Image (cartoon, coloured by chain):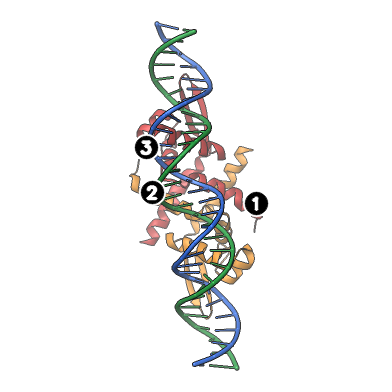
Chain colours: A red, B orange, C blue, D green
Amino acid sequence: MKSKQAYKKQARVLKALANETRLMIIDRLSQGECHVGELVRMSGVDQSTVSKHLATLRGVGVVDDERRGNAVYYRLVTPCVVDFFTCTAKVLKARS
Amino acid sequence: MKSKQAYKKQARVLKALANETRLMIIDRLSQGECHVGELVRMSGVDQSTVSKHLATLRGVGVVDDERRGNAVYYRLVTPCVVDFFTCTAKVLKARS
DNA sequence: TAACTACTTGACATTATGGCCATATGGGGT
DNA sequence: ACCCCATATGGCCATAATGTCAAGTAGTTA
């Protein structure tokens, strides 16, 4: 049993991942870094929206960014988040 | 690259876990089933609130419930969700 | 059946989230 | 300096999530 604060912090991390578009971004980044433009094309949502999602992910420290010329490249800092896909898949399967 | 729908479904599962109180509940249930009253005492939040959180977890199929007398017992259906704690801890650590 | 305990649900107010548009900002090229 | 491209940010709106209180349901006991 952890402290209330500890759960809050962990919840914040999970919340940062708990979104359709952000999951899509994470999944793409798990295959290697890429720049914002590509994420915009891939996700099909507005550029400003992608930028905000990236800010959310940056905020919890799951991704890191690096500017190279005009483009900003993002990459996954903690690849373990990819395991979430495995478990959520299990949950979805168990339910059926 | 999965379908938009697939990401949406997985996001729903993560969303169900991405809450301080629900994480606390999950953590408690990972040590074995228990009834609502105990979760209420443990979390310190209102019973109706706990009940709603349990409904959320039930909704995605992470927990299962069984009535025995007056009490309703909950248990974790997909224990892999506990691994989330490991990863979120890594994320929090990497950030510091 | 009435009273009690244990839990769930509905109605509602408050706050958070996600999307788009318009507008900054940062860097490169001319 | 200027313009252009790639990103980021602020404002706004619609919708979803959370909590509280009150009322409802289910099972137990007298």
**What residue is pinned by disc 2?**
B8
Asked if residue A39 shows in the view, the reply is: no
Percent across and percent down for residue D27 are 49, 83
Which amino acid type corresponds to the residue marked 1 in the rendered image? Gln
Task: Specify few, some or many for label 3: CA neighbours under 10 Å numbering under 14, 14-19, or 20 or more.
Answer: some
For the C terminus of chain B, the quadrant is: top right
Percent across and percent down for residue A92 are 39, 56
**What residue is pinned by disc 1?**
A5
Callout 2: helix, strand or loop? helix
Is B18 on the left or on the right of A8, as rendered?
left
Percent across and percent down for residue C18 are 43, 43
**What residue is pinned by disc 3?**
A43
Task: Specify few, some or many for label 2: CA neighbours under 10 Å numbering under 14, 14-19, or 20 or more.
Answer: some
- Mark 1–mark 3 Cα distance, whole angstroms, equals 34 Å
- Mark 2–mark 3 Cα distance, whole angstroms, equals 12 Å
Which residue is nearer to you in this view: D24 or B41? Answer: D24
Callout 1: helix, strand or loop? helix
For the N terminus of chain B, the quadrant is: top left
